[in-house]
Amino acid sequence: MSTPNFLLSNGKNMPMVGLGTWRSPPDVLTQAVKDAIDIGYRHFDCAHIYGNEAQVGVAIDEKLKEGVVTRDELFITSKLWNTHHRPDLVRPACETSMRNLGVDYLDLYLMHWPMAYKSGDNLYPTCPDTGKAVFEDIDFVDTWRAMEELVDRGLCHAIGVSNFNEQQINRLLSVAKLKPVVLQIECHPYLRQKSLITLCYDNAIAVTAYSSLGSAHTPYEKPGAYPLLKHPVVLEIAAKYDRSPAQVLLRFQTQSGIIVIPRSVSKHHMYENFKVWDFGLDNDDLQAIGDLDCNGRFMTMKAAYGHPHYPFEIAAPKQT
C-alpha cells in the first residue's frame, strides 16, 4: 500500500499519512516502525522530547540494509525542544536528533513550541514553588533564524513550526527569510482550527494534524461528552461506510488536504489507519462531523501558562 503525497512549498513531497511516535514505548517502537515500513508507511513523525528517536533509527537502519526502502523514499520529521531555543543550541539539537535517528539529513525540522524554557540538559526545568516550567527570554524569531541556517547547511530540507497561533505565524512570515513549510497543530472534529488552517493555506503552508483521533492517553484535558472514537455521530458514519471510527476521522482530515500522523504500535491499527484512500465521505457526513467542533483542546501544556509566547487561549469547551 501507499499514500498520496502533499507537495510542499519547497518542492518536496510529504506523505499524507505518517506514523506518530509520541508516547510510543521505546521497547516496542523499533518493531512497530519496521512493521509500519512493511505496511507502506514512509513518513515518520519524531521529536527529541519523545525520548525514542534512537529506537526509530534502529528500525530505519535495518530496513535500509534489507533494501526494503531507500533513504530518499522516507520522510522523517523531528522537532526542536523548548530548552534548545537559544540560537547557539539549535544546530547541536538538530544534530543530536539526526544522530539518534541515524540519518544525515532531516526532511523536516519543526520548532516544537514557540515558548523557550531554561536552556540546559533538563528537558522539563520546573519551579518547585509553582510547578510551572522555568522560562527563558528568547524570542522565537531568533530561534527561527538559527533554524534557517540548518537548511542553508543541508542538515534539513525544510523547516516549520508546531503549536503556533495565527499572530505568531503572521509575525514569523513578516520577518522570515525562509517561510515555514509546515505547521503541525492539534486538529480533530472537536478542535477544527479553521481560521488558522485558512491562514496557512493562504501562505502555502501545509498543515499536519496531531491527535486526529482524539487523544485517549492525554495527560491534559478531555473535551467533549464522548471520546471522539466513541461519539455517536462518528459511530453512525463508520457503520454507514463499513469502516472503523478511526478511518472515518482520518478520512475527514485528509479529504480536506490535512496531513495526519496517527500514533500506534499495533500492526492491525497501523494497517487500518493507513487504509483510508479507497473511500470518501459525502458532504452531509463531512458537515455532521464538522459540527462537533467545540473548541475542545486536549493538549493545553499547562506548565507553560503565563509564558509571553504561550499560544493558546483556553476556555472551557462546550459539551458536544
Image (spheres, helix red, strand yellow):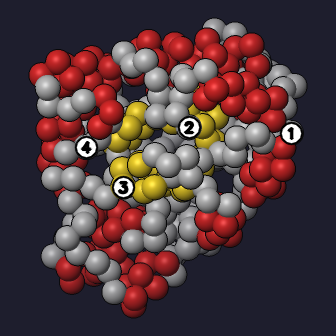
CB under 8 Å between discs 3 and 2: no
- What residue lies at 27% left-to-right and 55% top-to-bottom? 3
Give the image quarter of residue 213.
Answer: bottom left
What residue sits right under mark 1 in the picture? 308
Q: Disc 2 or disc 1, which is closer to the eye?
A: 2
Give the CA separation, mark 2 to mark 1.
Answer: 27 Å
Relative horizontal placement of residue 62, taking residue 6 as reference (left or right) = left
Give the CA separation, mark 3 to mark 2.
Answer: 16 Å
Q: Which mark is residue 5?
A: 3
Of the image marks 4 and 2, the number of the one nearer the N terminus: 4
Amino acid under label 1?
A: Pro
Of the image marks 3 and 2, the number of the one nearer the N terminus: 3
What residue sits right under mark 2 in the picture? 158
Give the CA separation, mark 4 to mark 2.
Answer: 20 Å
CB under 8 Å between discs 4 and 3: no
Label 3 CA crowd tier, 10 Å (few <14, some 14–19, many 20+):
few
Of the image marks 2 and 1, the number of the one nearer the N terminus: 2
Give the CA separation, mark 4 to mark 1.
Answer: 38 Å
What residue sits right under mark 4 in the picture? 41
Of the image marks 3 and 1, the number of the one nearer the N terminus: 3
| Residue furthest top in the image | 121
Amino acid under label 3?
A: Asn
Q: Position of residue 6 (x, y in %)?
A: 42, 56
